[in-house]
Amino acid sequence: MDIFNELAQHFEAIDDFKRFIDSQLAVDPQFLERTFWLDGQQVAILNYLIQQHEIENRNLIEFINYLFVKGIDTYLHQPIHLTLKLKKVDLLSLLLTKIPHLSQGSRASQHALNSYDETGQTMLSHAIESGDVSVFTRIFALNLNIHQASRVSVADGMQGFLQPLQQAVAVNFPEAVDKLLNAGAQVDNPCLDIKETPLLLAAHLGKIDALKVLLNHPRASAIVEQQTNNKNAEGHTAIELLCRRLQENKEPEQALKGIAMLLCHGTPAPTNELFRDLLTTHRVKLVKAVKEYTADGHASIKFLRASHDKNNALHGIVYSGKTWSQMVKKFFGVTDRLAFKCEKLFLLDVNHSQADQDEQLFASFVKRYRESIKRSTFYSPWSEMLSKITTGQVNNWTDVCQYAKDYPSTRTARIVEEMTKPEPEVYVNLSNL
């Protein structure tokens, strides 16, 4: 009978197990340090117990603890690596309490904590792979090397050595991304053969939660925003990688969210005409994604300013009249409401943005103009100002005022007059008080 079959016969009662371990140690004091053949591999006794442990059906915590009572080395054969790999989270507390006090610590202890297992992964790498915030937090608290790469496989068949931040991005683990950035992880270091920084990797794999953290983290956002025009080894920028995912229908809603985020942080619209046409087709959903991002407390002013700029490619995307649906709507006098939705975003964004007075006045005008139309029993859907707003021909306060001056009897002129009318002065007769 091999040792593991014999060992398994003593799992029913802890006292029986203790007697068996003691008898083996009496014969061979190094029994717990050795490895034994099992299914073609060399396995230590502690690791075998970890493999066999099941919290509900076969709870071996007390049995594992007895091995530590007998003086087994916490680092030998990397039981914590194995526990993380197998996601035996309930064993983690026990194993972590057995780590020697690191304040006395030695370089050997730190080396053991940062060591690789047979898969080429560190403890930190396994903790990231778990996707469990509690597990990651406890392993992260061991002050492991946050720059040490591990060999991992990610989506789309990509594999290679990734640093912890890169791996956290690849598995879309925003809490880990945040903690690693707080600790000073390298946000500008590329990885894999395609030479992708965390930003490019997030876009390539469509990891939008991680992308959001990268774009908004106080220690990283400025660096990340400078990288938005950077290309990977295949010549693609972050926004192009997300457009490609949208084109290939890979989680298209998530891709649009990522594109909206990048545009809100000042990323230029893609130069590729096919991608621009693609975004034009999805312009309504794109603005909706911007609205959702703004509602979450983020600024959309960079997106709005770019869409107002007639020399900016985004202007042609947001205010495009080239789609069949828009041409049909225009023919039948159906108003395109997207411009009104954009200016509504501007008003929502004013409290935490750098909007100037002209921008605020134009947004307020569009809101009043829309409300005026809604109150009207009859109005012309082919109204010149309505057409100019919805097509982006007029998108600033100066042009509105000029139009009001040129056409003083129009709805526009009346609204401008209301907006520019000085507030009446109030006089108080103090003698009556």
Image (cartoon, rainbow, N blue to C red):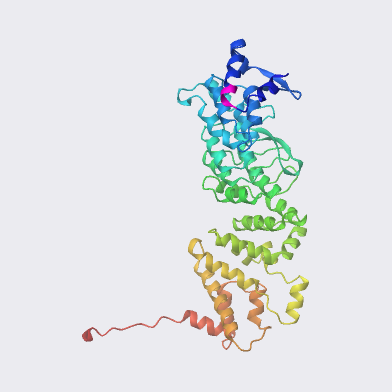
For residue 173: magenta? no
Residue 387 position (above or below residue 91): below
Q: Position of residue 6 (x, y in %)?
A: 68, 21
Q: Which of 223 and 206 is in front in this view?
A: 206
- Residue 112 placement, left or right of 252: left
Which is the main secondary structure of the residues drawn in magenta? helix
x 64%, y 65%: residue: 287
> Which residue lies at the image location 77% right of the left edge and 77% below the top edge?
328
The C terminus: image quadrant? bottom left
**22 versus 246 height, above or below:** above
Quadrant of res 148:
top right
- Residue 396 vs 102, above or below: the answer is below
- Say if residue 205 shows up in the picture: yes
Residue 348 x, y percent position in the rendering: 53, 67
**Quarter of the picture holding the N terminus:** top right
Foreground: 349 or 315?
A: 349
Q: Is residue 135 above or below residue 409?
A: above
Classify residue 71 as left or right of residue 48.
left
Which residue is at 65% across, 55% downward? Answer: 258
Residue 116 visible to an observer of this rendering:
no
Residue 40 placement: quadrant: top right
Q: What stretch is highlighted in magenta?
A: 13-17
Q: Position of residue 53 (x, y in %)?
A: 63, 32
Relative to 18, 427 lies left or right: left
Q: Quadrant of residue 422?
A: bottom left
